[in-house]
Structure formats: structure tokens, C-alpha cells
Image: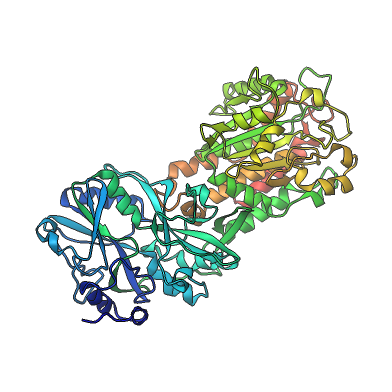
């Protein structure tokens, strides 16, 4: 039988393609673009004694391993997805033979293994080639089809959810997508969960453990056009990787890119996103440009966090901070923190140079609010303190736990470590744990920041440098570490991170040219009172954690959504008027005073009862929790 031309297979019926493969044509060639409108599948064939465990492994990792059909023992047809003539032993372009955890060779058919296969089970798992037509119909170009090759596929550093005896790293396929069409690609593929669904990562490949995007472990390298960014989908090669880790005596899989083409139309049970429903409508949010990296959440969450940003920035102290607000950075910071696993939070503004405890009461409550929410979401969190702050902050944390204002302690870490120099070299060493960053994210809230002359100043331009340790060095070191992101929260212009808007501070803020912090953070949250920025960020973290679209993206479509117990834990970590009042009373008792230097129940000159209570309630109303 002469082989049909490849172009003829674009709109061919699946049985035509299968017959061509059965005749030995298209050996090791990609099936991407073939039989458009019909579902393609990955293939794994395993011994019957491990089939049940593999099925559970697939159920725990539905993004990369969506099972469309599981055969009976020894069954070579797939009636659940194919009605016409088919034989799993012959109807793929190529098969990998896996022996003792290694791919030993690639063959055109499995007919040489007829007897063995009588005790094996076949798993047909959805493939992203199935949504080629949907992407093209939405105007999204597919570079692999333009370049007449397969997509690029990689082994990532992201682990699957293990189900004994199966484990392993997620594999991904990558398509270069024009930046302005990434959201379209996400929206089109989000409901196509039978074929991996929406992307699990957008942008910087290093964040998922891919060191060189030009060298895929599987399939073909692709050329990018100007304006393209890498977009990664979960890939069925993940199943093969799990089999390799198990080291079965023998198993079988498709050759990467050479898929089984079923008779099932891709629109059998597909649905589209209701863009008029903000809960369903995904929004792609760029978090950095160099290198490009984006996260995703729902339009509904975006709108609520925009309301939080307005609430936290209300300038009741008349400091003229309106122009210091960076619109959208609250959302970006919350999303970036959601992706972090280890976070360092720092605070402390020593206004009172003659006091035993020189620190004001703005900053620590906001830092603790953020840390509590991060802990509730399963992150590792440290509070970083310089030598002057370490004692007061340690005592404060001990008291908060003792009086049950906090139920879980937040570790306080001294920086720089005892006996080490306060310089850039120490910061770079501290920021590394082996070859990886110690923290994914650094966050400063109401932390005095270094001015352009290297000194530290109050809003009145009083030099307080003698009371300040060089936590700033960590932020400068992080600026040279692509995998570490930073957030600054402030309310006046002299706080760490405010260097992002220093020119505006010079122009709009009294003493601006003297006091302005020169060190920029990646994300900057300007608040009427810094604590309000902390409350808003904690609440924003809560919102994104409960967004199903973001949750799936954050966990790379493996594992399970949060349990009710986990959801309740994060709800209890939300800012709370009673808890914040108790915390303020303890702060005042330990001489963390209001900026006026008195032991009144104020923060930044504003009454807790009359102003801060109402602000917390306003923030909580945004999410319906008050």
C-alpha cells in the first residue's frame, strides 16, 4: 500500500492514518497535525500486576496522564475511543521497548510480542496534539506545524504526586506562542482536560528545571519568532518516565511524538469558557519581562484584588503617596508568592533613636499577617531581623505564642549571622543553600531602606543609620538571582523597595531627595499605612489560593485541590480585628510605639479603634468575610 502524502493526512479519517502506520509508513514521525479534529493519545502498556497502581497514579496526576481508555488484560482494541478496525500492536508509527528501566530500542510494531502482551494492560492517555485544530481556529499559530516537525518536549524538575510504586518528574511539551495570544491559548485549552487542559507553565523555563530550551530531551527543537514566548503543557511522556523509574522487566510505550489516533472527535465532550462569567474567565498576568514569566488566575480574583489595592492605598495620613502606587503590583506579588515555597519577611523602622526599643508599631503586624497566611498555605517562612531588631522581635513572637494570639511560631532569623561581615559577599553566601536559593521570595514591609548616599533616614530626614543592619544587601543580591523575586511594602518613600519609584519620591515627597530608598523591589505595594499593605497582601494570597484556575496552574496539574481542612486553615489566617487589637496591645507593652513616640493605641498617628478597625473590615468585605 503506497503511503498517503503527509499533507493528505491533515484532514484524513483516523482509520486511514492507522492503516498507513500498520503498513510501516511514517516510522518515528510526529502525528501532530494529522487527522485534525480527532483525538490522539499517548500509550503505555504494562504488566497486569502493576496496572491498578498505575491507574491510581494517573488519577493523582490527571494533567499529564488523563486516561481516556484502559484496556482489559490482553485486549488489543480500544472500543471506548475507536469504533473502526484497530490494533494497538500495529497502529502507531513507532513504539519504544522499555527493559529494566531503559528504552532499549524502537520498533514499527509490537507483533513480535504477541504472547507477552496477553498479560498486559494498555493505557490510552490524552495528547495535546488533539487541540491543534482548536488553537489554529482561535488564530494561535503552531510553530511546529509551520516548521514541519514535532513539538519540543522536556523532562522538568517538577515531581509528580507519587503513588507507590510509581513516581517521577513531569514531562512537558512546549509551543512558542506570540505573547499577545498566550491568554487565548490558555482559554482555548483550559476546558480540554481530556487532552492535558491548559498550560502548566508560561515563560522562564528555568523555573521548572529546564536549563536549555534549545535542547529538548524528546522530539524536536523549535525556532521562535520575534515576540514568541515558551508555553508549556503537561505531557504524556510523564507516564513513560514513571515506568522507567519502576524498572519493570519489560514495558511498552509510544515513541515520543508518534501517537495513537482514535476515532473520537475532539469536540465530543469539549466545552468552551464562558467569558461573561468572571469566575471561569482566565487572565494571564505577566510577573516579569526579563526573563518573561506569567501566572494565571480568574477575572473575578483580578477584580477583587484591584479593590484591595484601592483600599490599602487610601491616603488618610495625607502623605501625598498617590503617585507612588504601582497599579497591579499587589496582584503580581500575591501570584509570585503563591508560586514560592520558601519566603523571608523582614520589617523594622527604628524611629526612636533614644528609646530602649527604637521601633514603631507599624510593620510587625503586617509582616506577621503575611507570614501567617503563607504558613497556612504550606510555605516555609522566616522573619529576618538585624542585630538591633532581633531581640525585640524574638520577645514579641514568644509573647504572641504564649498568649495564644498566634498558634504557630514564626522563626526569627538573625541577619547577618553572628560574626559575619555586613556586605554583599555575605548576602550572596546567605542567599544560597547548596546550589539553590535559600528563599524564592524576599519581602520587606515598613523596613527602612538605604538612601542614595548609603545612609538611612526617617521621614524628617533624621539619620538612623547606626540602628540599621544591612538586610538591603539581600535584596541587592536577589536582584542578581533570576529565580528569586522581591516585594517591598511602604507608605512614605523611605522604605526598602521604594527605589522602584524613587524619581517620583524626589518630586512629590517632602525631603524626598534625601530620604528616598534607592533599592528597588520587583513588586512595590504602596499603602496608606504599611500594615494595610500587609493585610491586603495576606487577603490577596487567600483569594488566589481559592481560585481553581490558579490552583491547578500553581500545582502544575498534579496532585489534588485543597482539602476542606486546608481551606479552613487559610480562612483562619485572614486578618482579624480582635487578633490585631491584641497584637497591638502587646506591641505597646513591649515599647513598639506609634510614630508619635507615645504609648497610645494608634498606628502612624491613626486610632486603631476609629481607623484601623474599619480598614481591616473594609479589606475583609472585598472577599465577603466580614
The residue at the point 21 percent across, 77 percent down is 84
Q: Is residue 35 above or below residue 372?
A: below
Residue at x 90%, y 39% (from the top left corner): 511
Image coordinates of residue 107 in percent, x first then y, are 22, 62
Q: Is residue 427 above or below residue 169?
A: above
* x and y, in percent, of residue 376 in the image: 52, 38
Count of labels in the image: 0
Residue 193 occupies quadrant: bottom left
Query: What is the x, y in percent for residue 594?
Result: 79, 30
Expressed as whole percent of the image width and height from the top left, the position of residue 378 reads 49, 38
Residue 576 visible (yes or no): no
In the image, 183 versus 321, the foreground residue is: 183
User: Is residue 265 visible in this depiction of the protein?
Assistant: yes
> Which residue appears farthest toward the left when viewing the image?
115
- Which of the 4 quarters of the picture holds residue 106? bottom left
Location of the N terminus by quadrant is: bottom left
Snapshot colouring: rainbow
On the rendered structure, is 333 left or right of 513?
Answer: left
Residue sitting nearer the eye, 4 or 623: 4
Q: Nearer the viewer, residue 281 or 419?
A: 419
Image vertical order of residue 405 relative to residue 273, above or below = above
Nearer to us in this view, 97 or 263: 97
Please, is residue 488 above or below residue 122 in the view?
above
Amino acid at each position: 500500500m503506497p503511503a498517503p502524502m503527509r499533507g493528505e493526512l491533515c484532514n484524513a479519517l483516523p482509520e486511514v492514518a492507522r492503516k498507513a502506520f500498520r503498513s510501516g509508513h511514517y516510522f518515528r514521525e510526529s502525528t501532530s497535525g494529522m487527522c485534525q479534529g480527532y483525538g490522539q493519545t499517548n500509550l503505555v502498556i504494562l504488566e497486569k500486576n502493576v496496572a491498578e497502581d498505575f491507574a491510581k497514579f494517573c488519577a493523582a496526576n490527571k494533567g499529564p496522564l488523563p486516561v481516556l481508555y484502559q484496556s482489559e488484560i490482553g485486549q488489543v482494541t480500544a472500543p471506548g475511543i475507536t469504533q473502526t478496525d484497530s490494533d494497538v500492536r500495529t497502529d502507531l508509527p513507532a513504539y519504544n521497548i522499555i527493559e529494566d528501566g531503559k528504552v532499549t530500542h524502537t520498533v514499527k510494531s509490537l507483533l513480535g510480542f504477541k504472547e507477552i502482551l496477553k498479560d498486559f494492560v494498555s493505557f490510552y492517555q490524552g495528547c495535546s496534539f488533539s487541540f491543534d485544530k482548536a488553537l489554529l481556529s482561535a488564530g494561535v499559530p503552531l510553530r511546529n506545524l509551520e516548521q514541519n516537525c514535532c513539538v519540543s518536549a522536556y523532562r522538568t524538575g517538577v515531581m509528580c504526586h507519587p503513588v507507590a510504586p510509581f513516581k517521577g518528574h513531569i514531562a512537558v511539551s512546549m509551543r512558542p506562542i506570540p505573547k499577545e495570544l498566550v491568554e487565548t491559548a490558555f482559554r482555548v485549552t483550559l476546558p480540554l482536560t481530556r487532552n492535558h487542559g491548559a498550560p502548566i507553565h508560561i515563560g522562564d523555563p528555568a523555573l521548572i528545571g529546564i536549563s536549555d530550551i534549545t535542547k529538548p530531551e524528546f522530539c524536536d527543537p523549535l525556532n521562535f519568532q520575534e515576540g514568541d514566548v515558551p508555553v508549556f503543557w503537561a505531557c504524556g511522556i510523564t507516564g513513560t518516565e514513571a515506568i522507567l523509574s519502576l524498572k519493570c522487566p519489560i514495558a511498552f510505550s509510544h515513541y515520543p511524538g508518534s501517537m495513537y489516533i482514535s476515532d473520537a472527535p475532539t469536540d465530543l465532550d469539549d466545552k468552551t469558557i464562558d467569558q461573561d462569567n468572571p469566575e471561569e474567565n482566565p487572565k494571564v498576568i505577566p510577573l516579569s519581562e526579563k526573563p518573561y514569566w506569567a501566572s494565571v488566575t480568574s477575572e473575578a480574583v483580578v477584580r477583587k484584588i484591584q479593590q484591595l489595592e484601592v483600599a490599602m492605598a487610601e491616603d488618610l495620613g495625607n502623605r501625598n503617596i498617590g503617585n507612588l502606587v504601582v497599579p497591579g503590583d499587589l496582584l503580581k506579588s500575591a501570584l509570585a508568592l503563591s508560586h514560592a515555597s520558601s519566603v523571608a519577611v523582614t520589617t523594622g523602622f527604628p524611629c526612636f533613636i533614644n528609646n530602649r526599643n527604637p521601633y514603631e508599631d507599624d510593620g510587625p503586624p503586617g509582616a506577621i499577617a503575611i507570614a501567617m497566611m503563607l504558613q497556612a498555605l504550606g510555605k516555609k517562612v522566616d522573619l529576618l531581623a538585624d542585630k538591633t531588631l532581633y531581640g525585640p522581635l524574638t520577645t514579641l513572637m514568644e509573647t504572641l505564642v504564649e498568649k495564644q494570639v498566634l498558634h504557630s511560631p514564626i522563626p526569627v532569623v538573625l541577619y547577618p549571622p553572628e560574626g559575619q561581615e555586613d556586605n554583599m559577599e555575605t548576602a550572596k553566601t546567605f542567599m544560597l543553600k547548596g546550589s539553590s536559593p535559600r528563599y524564592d521570595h524576599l519581602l520587606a514591609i515598613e523596613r527602612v531602606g538605604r538612601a542614595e548616599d548609603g545612609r538611612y533616614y526617617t521621614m524628617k530626614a533624621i539619620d538612623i543609620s547606626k540602628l540599621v543592619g544591612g538586610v538591603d544587601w539581600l535584596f541587592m543580591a536577589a536582584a542578581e538571582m533570576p529565580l528569586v523575586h522581591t516585594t517591598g511594602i511602604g507608605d512614605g518613600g523611605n522604605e526598602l523597595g521604594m527605589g522602584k519609584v524613587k524619581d517620583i519620591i524626589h518630586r512629590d515627597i517632602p525631603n524626598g531627595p534625601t530620604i528616598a530608598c534607592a533599592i528597588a523591589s520587583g513588586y512595590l505595594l504602596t499603602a496608606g499605612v504599611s500594615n494595610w499593605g500587609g493585610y491586603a497582601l495576606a487577603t490577596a494570597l487567600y483569594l488566589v489560593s481559592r481560585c481553581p484556575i490558579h490552583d491547578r496552574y500553581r500545582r502544575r496539574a498534579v496532585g489534588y485541590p485543597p482539602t476542606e481542612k486546608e481551606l479552613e486553615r487559610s480562612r483562619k489566617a485572614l486578618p482579624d480585628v480582635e487578633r490585631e487589637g491584641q497584637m497591638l496591645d502587646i506591641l505597646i507593652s513591649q515599647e513598639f510605639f506609634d510614630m508619635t513616640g507615645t504609648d497610645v493605641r494608634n498606628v502612624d498617628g491613626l486610632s486603631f479603634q476609629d481607623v484601623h478597625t474599619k480598614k481591616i473590615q473594609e479589606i475583609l468585605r472585598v472577599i465577603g468575610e466580614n
